[in-house]
Image: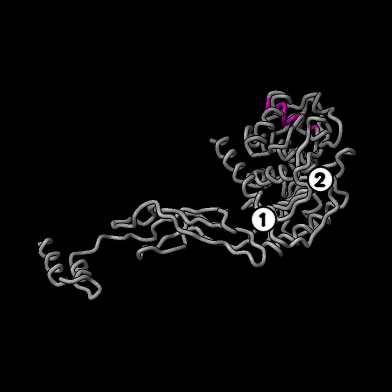
Amino acid sequence: MWKHILRRAGALALALACLPAGRARAVEVSASAAILMDMDSGRVLYERRADDRMLIASTTKIMTALVAIRDGNLSDTVKVSREAAYTEGSSMYLKEGEELTLETLLYGLLLCSGNDAAVAVAQHVGGSVEGFVERMNDTALELGMEHTSFANPNGLDHEEHYSTARDMALLARAAMGNETLARIASTRTVTVGGRTMTNHNKLLGLMDGCLGLKTGYTRAAGRTLVSCAQRGGQRLIAVTLQDGNDWADHQSLFDYGFSAYPARRMAQLGHQLASRNGVPLVAADSFAWPLAQGENLETSVVLSRALTPPLRAGTRVGEAVFSLNGREVGRVGLLVGKNVNPPSPVQEAARAASPASSGGAAEAAMKILRSYR
């Protein structure tokens, strides 16, 4: 079930990402590759070499955390191996033989960017680093990350370890959709398992509405950053690869995206969206889409059954389809908004006798009334 959902989500995200952004291009960044994506719709609002394969450094750990949360148990006790304790690079300073919960290791992974934590997590959840990396690559395919390859769980440079800005944005969408991962990534400082850890992501303190995610750096990869921010209920994801000015660039990207592409709500769960033959049709889900100035969505109602009484409130009878420039961007189910009963004999007789009816109205009305006696 999980894989089926991920495949559908990945395919939809790729389709939506192909929709062109509006004409506004009032932002530039220093990154070699970058992308700005609306999280909920998947629409790309800005991109620069977004499909170039690049080293991604410790932003890799977003995938490590996602797979660990999906396949592991946060309360599990993990014993740190020698290999994990002596992993090179950034560290949460694990000691061989030390025992911690998986959740504590995930804080060390996402806040301290611990390479040692990544290996400990991989060995525990995947049985081995190699087995865990295989799960990472399987999940990447399920998410539609077609230009990504993982060779390790920490992001250390390797010729078979790479991704693209677009693929990392797809990963960020899945990650921020996971409540546990989003909670940990948004934490600025925490004391857990006897350790006090502070998040390396300075955007959490530099800008209002930052929901976190992950930093990265190696000499070969340069500075990499994946972040998510929210304003007025709209969430955007920014990715920059090989960017020496990433803190400022992400703030500029978010300012641009929120101002140039505000989300417009087209449907709200439980609220009437349309009416057909006197039957109110309410939305089975909410739907919003980021629109540039001058853009408008078209809404069409597609019924899957005749609206013939009796109809029970809550019955699904069709869908509302939303399109931009003739291309579908989303749809929501339509439900009957109230019980609709068949007309009573008196109502049928009155309708038959109405001036709008054809000739012989009085006789037709009398026949209807007699049939109910």
- The answer to whether residue 217 is seen in the rendering is yes
**Outermost residue, front direction?**
359
The picture places residue 90, in percent across and down from the top left corner, at 85, 37
Q: Which stretch appears magenta?
A: 116-126
Task: State the colouring used for the structure image.
Answer: one colour
State yes or no: discs 2 and 1 in contact (Cβ < 8 Å): no
Among the two numbered marks 2 and 1 on one chain, the one whose residue lies closer to the N terminus: 1
The picture places residue 370, in percent across and down from the top left corner, at 10, 64
Residue, x 64% and y 62% (percent of image)? 291
Majority secondary structure in the magenta region: helix
Residue matched to label 1: 235
Q: Is residue 30 above or below residue 293?
A: above
Packing grade of label 2 (10 A; few <14, some 14-19, many >=20) is: many
Residue 89 location, quadrant: top right
Q: Is residue 90 above or below residue 232?
A: above
**Outermost residue, right direction?**
219
Residue matched to label 2: 241
The kind of secondary structure element at disc 2 is strand
Q: Is residue 305 left or right of residue 330?
A: left
The picture places residue 101, in percent across and down from the top left corner, at 70, 34
Mark 1: which amino acid? Arg
Q: Is residue 222 above or below residue 284?
A: above
Residue 196 shown in magenta: no
Real-space CA distance between mark 2 and mark 1, rounded to the nearest whole angstrom? 20 Å
